[in-house]
Amino acid sequence: MSVDDNNRFGRPWRPATQLVHGGTLRSSFGEMSEALFLTQSFAYPTMEAAEARFKGEEPGFIYSRFSNPTVAMFEQRMMLLEGAEAARATASGMAAVTASLLAPAQAGDHVVAARALFGSCLYVVEELLPRYGVASTLVDGVDLQQWRRAVRKETKLFFLESPTNPGLEVYDIRAIADIAHEAGAKLIVDNVFATPLLQKPFELGADVVVYSATKHIDGQGRCLGGIILASRELIEANIHNFLRQTGPALSPFNAWVLLKGLETLPLRVARQAASAATIADFLSAQKGVARVLYPFRDDHPQAALARAQMSGGGTLVSFDVQGGKAAAFRLANALAIVKISNNLGDAKSLITHPATTTHQRLTPEARARMGVGDGLLRLSVGLEDPDDLICDLEYGLRAARG
Ligand SMILES: Cc1ncc(COP(=O)(O)O)c(C=O)c1O
């Protein structure tokens, strides 16, 4: 196998180049598109070689639950993009989140997390970890005092998403990382909503970055995947053995799809974020829209912070429709281009009603605390022409007004 040279000019390739070529392992056939090694195991030339590989004395693949050449290419390309020393791919974003929280924790430890989490992440923090003796405290992520006050001597991990789902709140990653480090804890950032291009959590002090690659990294709604990125030391000490023994491995086929997704990620994210900003401005001027949430709009509560720590406002827009659930349902049901789906980051625009889908498990009080009202809709802006999307939304808004 040969590896493309990514340091030819005395400096690493720029991100768009890395995303096309970075981490490519080319076999003796010289294939242009990354090879798909759809294999469970690998043959050893001799018994001695098998023994050496198991002992870690000789490089080489052993079994695809541990690692696989196509998966390794995906991990390598993500490491180059993120500026991380090490990475492990997983079968889904939730496998990445769960492993990043569970693998380093022991009974008696304590985790502090922002309350505004994706529903399944909230389940892991609030219900799963305590079952194994790992206590958790949920805080209002915007309020740095709450992060500070939540710290205990057993606090091992901080966890947050920014921007959040679906309220698009933005948290001060650098300040929260400082609080975590003063307490001797590590900060894990779920960077899904920002995408690897618009926010660089390691530069802001994060210790671990996780992704649902299902979202923008695939970007065309095909397969599930996830990844954990961190220092070599953290991955080796905490993550490597946990994943190897418990088995949430990424399929080589999905890794291949995700590699293809990475090639076009900068083009897609730039276009989708530009359309999202246009649509947020359009929605804010419409009768029947009570509130628009978009991190780069001046009326966003953390607009200045968003501009300081992100290089774009992202591809999602949330908005409150006057008339509550009935009006929100009428709006979404009337759309022709935008599809009703709880996924995000797809080339196709998707709309969801968080109160009855992703956040329906929460009590109305918990939803209210997160700003998830009955009229809230979350729009994931796709690659369609933004003028067509605006026409579609105009039609929906007319239906919402009744
Ligand atoms: C912020 C966030 N984190 C994690 C996940 C989980 O990812 P997956 O569906 O790939 O398990 C999702 C979406 O599902 C998400 O929106």
Image: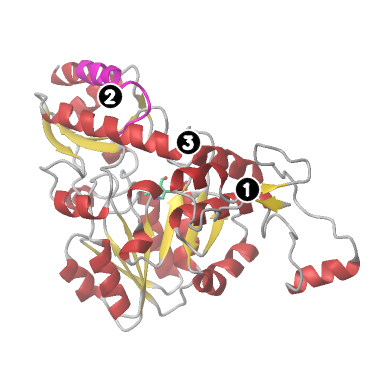
Compared to residue 297, the image places residue 72 above or below, namely below
**Residue that appears at 11% across and 24% down:** 286
* Amino acid bearing label 1: Thr
Q: Toward the viewer: 104 or 253?
A: 253
At label 2, counting other C-alpha atoms closer than 10 Å, the crowd grade (few under 14, some 14-19, many 20 or more) is: many
Q: CA separation, marks 1 and 3?
A: 16 Å
State the residue position of label 2: 332
Q: Which of marks 2 and 1 is in front?
A: 1
Please give the label number shown on residue 24. 1
Q: Is 282 covered by the magenta stretch?
A: no
State the residue position of label 3: 264
Q: Toward the viewer: 373 or 188?
A: 188
For the residues bearing labels 1 and 3, Cβ distance under 8 angstroms: no
Compared to residue 266, the image places residue 88 above or below, namely below
Q: Quadrant of residue 148?
A: bottom left
Q: CA separation, marks 2 and 1?
A: 42 Å
**Residue that appears at 16% across and 70% down:** 145
Q: Is 390 covered by the magenta stretch?
A: yes
Which element type, helix, strand or loop, lies under badge 1?
loop
Q: Position of residue 34 (x, y in %)?
A: 65, 41
